Image: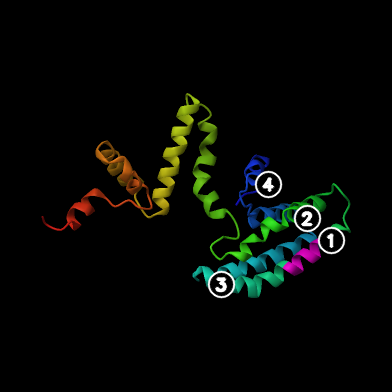
Amino acid sequence: MCDDFAGYKAGFEKGMTEIGCMAHARRKFFDLHVANKSQLTEQALHSIGGLYEVERQARDMSDEDRWRIRQEKAAPIITTLHDWMLAQRDLVPNGSAPAKALDYSLKRWVALTRYLDDGAVPIDNNQVENQIRPWALGRSNWLFAGSLRSGKRAAAIMSLIQSARMNGHDPYAYLKDVLNRLPTQRASDIGQLLPHQWIPARTMQVSSPPA
């Protein structure tokens, strides 16, 4: 799931499935609405808002139930929105701001609507973007990591920290435990130290049955 950054295209050519981020599509109309309110932007935001209302209703559902409610409630909104966008595109001049906002969605429509077919797929990429926001805000301070290898290592550590938080762990406690256990951890069991599989060493010792 991504925006329209050209750097992702190579992955799609190799067989990756592209899923569009509805938040990026909405942002095009939102920014246009802030700059110049119009009936076109209001209608677009209203329709996309309907899609997000379905997601709010489906938030705590199983993947299968979420798929069902999307098919029942979101799919008709998607169809109507697509027809409306096509009609509006014929009414606005090429190169205009409304045309660019409409083109962003229309050219990526298949990717933007793939979430309808899988209840496990989110409507947008906001959760991941919120996780990486601290690094995005700080990157101006990290222009120089020393070397390419240092940059890759920093990226790996940042990913572990955020993954630990997403799995409900204290990042400091997680990293401290993992670093203490790494020297004696068997290579075949290294996966046990990943955030989604990690069990603190002390917990493992307490819960172990007596010999």
**Was residue 72 drawn as part of the magenta stretch in this picture?**
no
Q: Are marks 1 and 2 in contact (CB under 8 Å)?
A: yes
In the displayed structure, 209 sits above or below 59; it is above
Q: Are marks 3 and 1 in contact (CB under 8 Å)?
A: no
Question: Residue 186, which numbered label?
Answer: none
The tally of labels here is 4
For marks 3 and 4 on the same chain, the one whose residue lies earlier in the sequence:
4
Categorize mark 1 by other alpha carbons within 10 Å: few (<14), some (14-19), many (20+). some
- Name the amino acid type tagged 2: Leu
Q: Are marks 3 and 4 in contact (CB under 8 Å)?
A: no
The residues tagged by marks 1 and 4 sit, at their Cα atoms, a distance apart of 22 Å
Question: Residue 57, which numbered label?
Answer: 3
Q: Are marks 4 and 2 in contact (CB under 8 Å)?
A: no
Q: Nearer the viewer, residue 182 or 138?
A: 182
Q: Residue at x 32, y 40 (%)?
A: 187
For marks 1 and 2 on the same chain, the one whose residue lies earlier in the sequence:
1
Q: Residue at x 50, y 31 (%)?
A: 142
Q: Residue at x 58, y 67 (%)?
A: 55
State which region is magenta. Answer: 79-86
Q: Are marks 1 and 4 in contact (CB under 8 Å)?
A: no
Categorize mark 3 by other alpha carbons within 10 Å: few (<14), some (14-19), many (20+). few
Q: Which residue is mark 4?
A: 4
